[in-house]
Amino acid sequence: MKKFIFKLETVLNVKERREEQLKHELMKLQALKIREEQLLGEVKEKRTYISRQKSDENKKGTDIQNLIHFEQYLGVLLKKIDDTQKSIKVLEEKADIKRVEVVEASREKKVFEKLKEKQFGEFQRIVIQNEQKVLDEMAVTRFNRKEQKSY
């Protein structure tokens, strides 16, 4: 009996590898986004801490140089927060695009998997049909032999 061979197996393998590669890229983007969100949280905490420090220093009556230093540092932190938020938004957009690519690659792979299943089902049907023909031929041959012996 012949073994089932799917002629498009290499194409299916390529589709599977492409899907896995895209999933891996998506995971990297999600990890980068998580890191950026953590950084954003840290910078916001630092800004809150510096704002409290500035307020405390202002209540104590500090010199203008310290207040200018606090304001400049808070400005730098605000810029960093804004940049990080923009970076997160860009990463989200890239991740959304990558998700669409993963879904499309998965669909393409499933098309080939269904084709393989369909061809395998047809192969099994033909194998069963051929086996049935062989069994029928054997039964006819036995019957003919018994008929010939009875004469």
Image (cartoon, grey):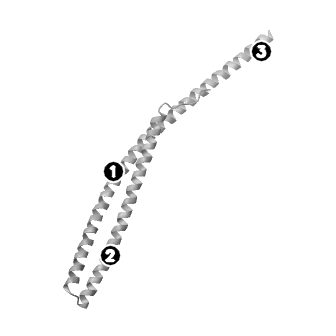
The residue wearing badge 3 is: 146
> Nearer the viewer's eye, disc 2 or disc 1?
2
Whole-Å distance between the Cαs marked 2 and 1?
33 Å
Tell me what residue is drawn at x 29 percent, y 82 percent.
Answer: 52
Q: Looking at the image, which residue sits at the far top? A: 151
Per the model, the C-alpha gap separating discs 3 and 1 is: 74 Å
| Residue occupying the point 65% across, 21% down | 134
Q: At numbered mark 3, what does the secondary structure look like: helix, strand or loop? A: helix
Q: Is residue 86 visible?
A: yes
Which numbered marker is on residue 121? none
Q: Nearer the viewer, mark 3 or mark 1?
A: 1
Looking at the picture, does residue 88 appear above or below residue 41? above
Mark 3 near mark 1, Cβ–Cβ under 8 Å?
Answer: no
- The amino acid on which the numbered mark 2 sits, given as a three-letter code, is Lys
Q: Amino acid at mark 1?
A: Ile
Residue situated furthest left in the rendering: 64
- Residue holding disc 2: 46
Question: Dot 2 surroundings within 10 Å: few (below 14), some, or many (20 or more)?
Answer: some
- Which numbered disc covers residue 97? 1
> N-terminal of the two: label 2 or label 3?
2
| Residue appearing at x 38%, y 63% in the figure | 35
The C terminus lies in which quarter of the figure?
Answer: top right
- C-beta proximity under 8 Å, tags 2 and 3: no
Q: Residues within 10 Å of mark 3 (few under 14, many from 20)?
A: few
Kind of residue indicated by mark 3: Lys
Could you tell which of marks 2 and 1 lies nearer the N-terminus?
2
Query: Which of the image's four quarters has the N terminus?
Result: top right
Instruction: Pick whichever of labels 3 and 1 is earlier in the sequence.
Output: 1
**Left or right, 61 with reference to 136:** left
User: x%, y% of residue 30?
Assistant: 39, 58
